[in-house]
Image (cartoon, helix red, strand yellow):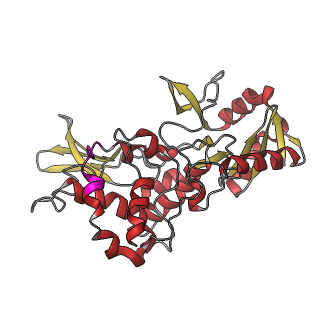
């Protein structure tokens, strides 16, 4: 175990930023969001960022290819350049686990080379939680908020930051800043982990379980008459999908720049009325069908196709952001009585 005093945290950030791009959670416009580090930028004390770290690997808008048209000649231009190495510092356990979900989608054959390139260049430094919120339920998906995954795991105490490398990437990062670090035992870390677990054991959603869901109950869940009442107040705004760290749906569009065509992809939402619309029409005509699709994918379809891993990490963003207070926990608890 290595540590650095909090008084030298700026020195640590400066040292990392000198080697590669560094992003930390910082308070902007009243919310915490990942921001590129510049000397003096202060790390947020917020539990989590407003939006997840998913943006670094699957950005909200991404240019895919450019076309230049000159008469009958079409030039195809790959706009990608080699991505710079970067570090995302302070990723919470829920978001750190979300990359496992995204990897199963974007790194499966055929591999999404845009996503894969970013994953190759990115290093994840996770931060253990010390004060989980009442909306947190990551433990329901086997996530330990007191000891999160990541290339490097950090614990922040009152006077120091403790670091542990978990992967080759993590070891390479630690090696770059090792002169700033000192050896330490893990007594303070173990004490913090115990205190965090005590809080987790008292949270309102600590008993939430998905054990009744998965591919085995696909048709029972799909045909439940509960979807009518659950979906009737849904606004179809897509807020839940845009703050979700595991949603991966996107649309591809062409934009005429006046000097050619830019083909780009952008996040989409299964809650939108034009989602998956084709020349033959819209396969999900009602909000009920679109609403059902979102939660069936998280709780049934994804685990059925990924060895039981759910498409949710319990970050709680959908609980806190939905304007009608609808969320995956409420849906699951309503359905589980019929399964």
Residue 173: in magenta span = no
Q: Residue at x 19, y 51 (%)?
A: 274
Residue 112 visible: no
Residue 301 visible: yes
Q: Residue at x 47, y 44 (%)?
A: 317
Q: Along the horizontal axis of the image, is 121 left or right of 13?
A: left
Q: Position of residue 285 (x, y in %)?
A: 15, 57
Q: Nearer the viewer, residue 338 or 7?
A: 338
Q: Residue furthest front?
A: 337
Residue 234: in magenta span = yes
Q: Nearer the viewer, residue 321 or 74?
A: 321
Q: Quadrant of residue 334?
A: bottom left
Q: Position of residue 125 (x, y in %)?
A: 66, 46
Q: Position of residue 325 (x, y in %)?
A: 38, 43
Circle count: 0
Q: Nearer the viewer, residue 210 or 165?
A: 210
User: Looking at the picture, does residue 105 appear above or below residue 235?
Assistant: below
Extent of the magenta region: 229-237
Q: Residue at x 67, y 44 (%)?
A: 129
The rendered magenta stretch, by its main secondary structure, is classed as: loop
The quadrant the C terminus occupies is: bottom left
């Amino acid at each position: 175990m290595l540590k650095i005093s909090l008084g030298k945290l700026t020195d640590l950030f400066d040292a990392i930023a000198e080697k590669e791009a560094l992003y930390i959670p910082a308070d902007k416009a009243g919310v915490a969001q990942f921001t590129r580090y510049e000397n003096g930028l202060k790390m947020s004390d917020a539990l989590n960022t407003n939006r997840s770290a998913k943006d670094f690997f699957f950005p909200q808008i991404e240019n895919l290819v450019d076309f230049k048209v000159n008469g009958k000649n079409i030039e195809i231009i790959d706009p990608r350049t080699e991505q710079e190495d970067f570090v995302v510092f302070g990723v919470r356990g829920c978001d750190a686990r979300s990359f496992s979900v995204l990897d199963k989608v974007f790194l499966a054959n055929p591999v999404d080379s845009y996503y894969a390139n970013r994953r190759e260049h990115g290093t994840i430094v996770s931060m253990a939680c010390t004060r989980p919120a009442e909306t947190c339920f990551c433990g329901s998906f086997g996530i330990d908020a007191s000891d999160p995954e990541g290339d490097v795991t950090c614990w922040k105490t009152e006077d120091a930051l403790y670091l542990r490398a978990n992967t080759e990437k993590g070891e390479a990062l630690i090696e770059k800043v090792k002169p700033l670090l000192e050896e330490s035992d893990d007594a303070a870390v173990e004490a913090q982990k115990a205190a965090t677990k005590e809080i987790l054991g008292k949270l309102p959603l600590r008993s939430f379980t998905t054990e009744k869901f998965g591919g085995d109950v696909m048709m029972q869940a799909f045909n439940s008459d509960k979807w009518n009442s659950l979906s009737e107040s849904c606004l179809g705004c897509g807020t839940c999908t845009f703050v979700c760290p595991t949603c991966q749906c996107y649309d591809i569009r062409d934009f005429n720049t006046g000097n050619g065509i830019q083909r780009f992809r952008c996040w989409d939402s299964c809650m939108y009325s034009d989602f998956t619309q084709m020349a033959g029409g819209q396969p999900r005509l009602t909000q009920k069908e679109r609403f059902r699709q979102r939660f069936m994918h998280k709780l049934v379809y994804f685990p059925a196709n990924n060895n039981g891993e759910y498409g949710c990490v319990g970050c709680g963003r959908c609980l806190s952001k939905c304007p009608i207070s609808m969320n995956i926990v409420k849906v699951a608890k309503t359905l589980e009585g019929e399964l």
